[in-house]
Amino acid sequence: MARELRSWPWALVRLALYAACLGFVQGGKLLVFPVDGSHWLSMREVVQELSLRGHESTVVAPELSLHIREGRHYTLKTFPVMFSKDLFKDLMHTNIHKVFEPEPFLKRFFNSISLMKNASYMHLGFCRDLIYNKELMKSLEETHYDAVLTDPVIPCGAILAQYLSLPTVYFLRGVPCGLDTESTQCPDPSSYIPRMATENTDRMTFLQRVKNILYALPQNVVCHMLYSPFVSLASELLQRSLSIVDVLSHGSVWLMRTDFVMDYPKPVMPNMIFIGGINCAKNKQLSQEFEGYVNASGEHGIVVFSLGSMVSEIPMAKAMEIADALGTIPQTVLWRYTGKPPSNLAKNTKLVKWLPQNDLLGHPKTRAFITHAGSHGIYEGLCNGVPMVLMPLFGDQMDNAKRMESRGAGVTLNVLEMTSADLSKALKTVINDKSYKENIMRLSALHKDRPISPLDLAVFWVEFVMRNKGAPHLRPAAHDLNWFQYHSLDVIAFLLAIVLTVVFIAVKSYMFCCQKCFGKKGKAKKAPKSKSH
Amino acid sequence: MARELRSWPWALVRLALYAACLGFVQGGKLLVFPVDGSHWLSMREVVQELSLRGHESTVVAPELSLHIREGRHYTLKTFPVMFSKDLFKDLMHTNIHKVFEPEPFLKRFFNSISLMKNASYMHLGFCRDLIYNKELMKSLEETHYDAVLTDPVIPCGAILAQYLSLPTVYFLRGVPCGLDTESTQCPDPSSYIPRMATENTDRMTFLQRVKNILYALPQNVVCHMLYSPFVSLASELLQRSLSIVDVLSHGSVWLMRTDFVMDYPKPVMPNMIFIGGINCAKNKQLSQEFEGYVNASGEHGIVVFSLGSMVSEIPMAKAMEIADALGTIPQTVLWRYTGKPPSNLAKNTKLVKWLPQNDLLGHPKTRAFITHAGSHGIYEGLCNGVPMVLMPLFGDQMDNAKRMESRGAGVTLNVLEMTSADLSKALKTVINDKSYKENIMRLSALHKDRPISPLDLAVFWVEFVMRNKGAPHLRPAAHDLNWFQYHSLDVIAFLLAIVLTVVFIAVKSYMFCCQKCFGKKGKAKKAPKSKSH
């Protein structure tokens, strides 16, 4: 009831915003180059909304995709790729299984690098296949788009935008190794901004701050390795020498899937717009199937379990361990799982090939959410105020999990090391210890307490860039400075040189005076002595 | 017509926002401690809007005020002050006349300091009179306000808020010497962020960057002088040792009267909300008197001339020089002026004791705006798209003027050095050279192209702080670090010590090995020699 009451004013806000824009936004043309997976699923919301506002979007994607399909709100243009379909499937499959293999830290680290390298190699191949697809590139050039919408974590869209000389809106969770902060000229002190995969919070001990700096070093090497082939491709295409920062800093507006209820407050730039939670704005009615599960759960309610859009099955040993734990709670568990059902599956656990995650989390009978801590899942848990058991697998998931845990809204488990008892205990804790529900409800209220919905904000800024041909007034002059100018090192050196010169002259003058004075006195004193001889 | 068409959707947005807030905002109690002058005039808009949304505001002000009067949207509580009324008037009058006195740079600098010191001394006196007014303080304590709204440029409201342990919303143009950036932990590189009174833009030559750093040094000394008495008062009242940053950093949300169409883009913090142009959101119908002036101006239209709410008369010699220039243009000039009319006043120039500046600037027949470049005036010129002749007098006005001039939207004159011919030429330039109108119209469109009006944004954030008892999730952890921790100097020193120790041990080991190896060889070589003897 409360939700219905609250949702109609938002509908009114959005209606009014449409109207406000009607006067000066004509149907524009948007070129969209998405990144596959959940990245696309939330970007799609924006594309759909833009279509409702009269804009035409063309989504360009490789023919091998997990989630990028035809849609009625945009035109899909796929391009053929040289990468084999079997290799694509293999890569996805290997990636998923590798994360469940218990191996020593260093081996896991090098495995991760190897996996990232393979994925990067695949995306680079896709990018080459696009750039050298003369027919498609010609048609893109001839269409005269108003702007490009892309996720810069794979910089192909950014390269394409520079080639077509189009203003660009980035839609992202982040770019590894702080390349997003570097490309926006955003200060990023490591003393209180935790670096990726450190699991640090914003309040660090001395040793955690040491770790924060040390972790950045190998990450920078890895990032250089991953992005340098894209940089070469960009330099080749644009016929000038570029760095990855040159490629990314072309972005006019950065739509960041971040909210400071989840992430820690830190410096930002005026062209960064925060739209965290954009993926959970709308709760829809449950289908009959899921409504049935929920209603049948009785007073104990349900637990939603999903490891994200990329991971729908896991090794059998781990699945059995998990199934065992799920059987120990009185709630009905809805588990998104496409693999072979574990033989020890308890009666309270329903395996489903797909589940309407955000809608289920929005149901008042949902007691907990078992998630891999991907940013989309985290925001859906946050929006709907559901305590979480977090089982991070890769990427930013460890950090997301740490953020929720540090705020008392969830319990984190190491998916490799956890036992069945650990999962059972974690589930019982977040369900029965009231503080978890209270904390997530408080965070949820804060997260939703904003002057404009993240979806409307994102759509506004895409339209802004389209109608104003970019946002040059939001581009800081820091882009024109090199690093020593930025830090005023040349000015400091100049002022220091002046001070030292003045000091030097003063000392020399003083010594000269002393020599003159004491020299004479010395002579004067010595003179009588010589006379006395 | 276009304005009417555009304004109704905004009304709808605001209606919807009211409705959106209705569910979870109950009438709250706000304590307002404003700073007199134009600062109060724009803050009053927010207080009025809050009253319309059902909140009760109490405005606390000294009995000596220029503009703070009773109003139907708030309760005014004035307190008696020891400062004499005559001295108050004298101080205002001297301040105004001093700025028109042509004197050498250094004398002007020391004069300015002396004036600021006097004003600061007056405000400090007011603050003491409030803090030690037991009856008023007791009533403020007993009322249990939800939050404080104050302008921190005079930190009395901030001190009061800390004493009452209330969350605080700051409403400001800025605090001198970068105290606002320091108190929000916002990075502020001097390499591209122009310092006050330097008249630099964000793109500086090497020497301008040197100037940018050098100007900050004496300003810091002056600020220390101005603010240290407030700090002593705060330490005395709160019974603990404080710095000015400790006093100001208490603010939950900083409503900055800044917009990046006017100011240069730079790093910001998540609790800084940008509401530049809040004072010019609404254009009202002109009164019959002013409608008459405008209609009678014919095809040439009008020029609006005001030196702000603090300056309504100027020395006669300067007034005559200006009057002479105004007579050379065909436009009707509406000049806000309360002094004795200059004898050479031309027929086209109408002196008025007060003028509805924003409404006049919004009239399509307005051709130019002669302004002292106060931030309020600048934003009114910007909102309404009127090219400006800028005659900055003090404070941030030189910098505001430079910003408009650097964007091709106005011509700056030095009010002390300018001749009648200079003013005439500047007026003809901004009126007849189409580029000025084009530039200001482009800037105006950009400035107004935002997802939510600055007034609604300001009101939203005041309500946010009231209902959430502050905004701790937006407070960066940097507040808990000292300066060498913030810059990771301790970590760098630690890592350097490790590296040096390793190098030292390696070199020592190498030398030891060398000594062992070559030493033996040396001995081996020497041995035969000694044998040969």
Image: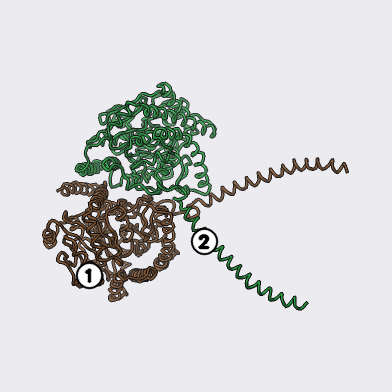
Chain colours: A green, B brown
Q: Is B73 placed above or below A225 here?
A: below
Q: Is B382 placed above or below A182 here?
A: below
State the residue position of label 1.
B320
**How many labels were placed on the picture?**
2
Amino acid type, mark 2: Val
Q: Position of residue B201 (x, y in %)?
A: 36, 54
In the image, taking residue B102 as reference, residue A405 lies left or right, namely right
State which quadrant residue B125 falls in. Answer: bottom left
Q: Secondary structure at mark 1?
A: helix
- Mark 1 is surrounded, within 10 Å at the Cα level, by few (under 14), some (14 to 19) or many (20 or more) other residues, namely some
Q: Position of residue B370 (x, y in %)?
A: 24, 61
Amino acid type, mark 1: Met
State the residue position of label 2.
A499
Q: Chain of mark 1?
A: B
Q: Is residue B112 among what the camera can see? A: yes
Q: Residue at x 26, y 72 (%)?
A: B315
Q: Residue furthest right?
A: B533
Circles 2 and 1 on the same chain: no
Q: Is B441 placed above or below A375 here?
A: below
Q: Residue at x 28, y 35 (%)?
A: A145
Q: Position of residue A342 (x, y in %)?
A: 43, 24
Assign the C terminus of chain A to one quadrant of the image. Answer: bottom right
Q: Chain of mark 2?
A: A
A153 or B34, nearer to the observer: A153
Q: Position of residue A245 (x, y in %)?
A: 42, 41
Q: Could you tell me how far apart the alpha carbons at marks 2 and 1 are, in whole angstroms?
A: 48 Å
Q: Residue at x 41, y 63 (%)?
A: B219
Assign the N terminus of chain A to one quadrant of the image. Answer: top left
B302 or A116, nearer to the observer: B302
Q: Secondary structure at mark 2?
A: helix
